[in-house]
Amino acid sequence: MTTWTGELTVFAVAAEGSAVRVDLVGGDQMVCGSLLYEFDDEAECARNFAVLGQWRDARTPVLAFTEDDVVTLVDPQATVENLLAELSTNWP
């Protein structure tokens, strides 16, 4: 089952070896918690750490999609902007 929680804010982000810990607050359910993402690839770990740090610094609202035991964080505004840009360049 897929669930989502909206309007979360990245409160803190920390690199822990090959993992990234992200603390989240907010949402309609008043979430306050941490996620730990583990990566096999150091470059992927660094990229995700950088993106989460940017979201923290900009106070970007994010959505959390949960399916089984996997939580995916998404910047909905950037996702829509990227989709619209792709559609406009690939429109017939």
Image (cartoon, rainbow, N blue to C red):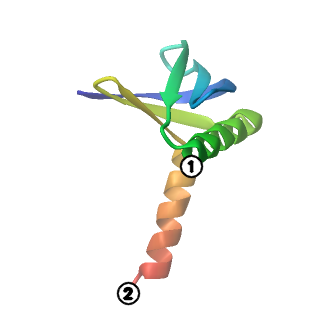
* Residue at figure coordinates x 52%, y 21% from the top left: 35
Q: Nearer the viewer, residue 3 or 70?
A: 70
* Residue at figure coordinates x 47%, y 63% from the top left: 83
Q: Amino acid at mark 2?
A: Pro
69 sits left or right of 90 in the view: left
* Residue at figure coordinates x 71%, y 34% from the top left: 59
The residue where tag 2 is placed is: 92
Residue 16: percent from left, percent from top: 63, 24
11 sits left or right of 31 in the view: right
Mark 1, Cα crowd under 10 Å, few <14 / some 14-19 / many 20+, is few
The residue where tag 1 is placed is: 77
Count the marks: 2
Residue 42: percent from left, percent from top: 58, 42
Say whether disc 1 or disc 2 marks the residue closer to the N-terminus: 1
Q: Amino acid at mark 1?
A: Gln
Mark 2, Cα crowd under 10 Å, few <14 / some 14-19 / many 20+, is few
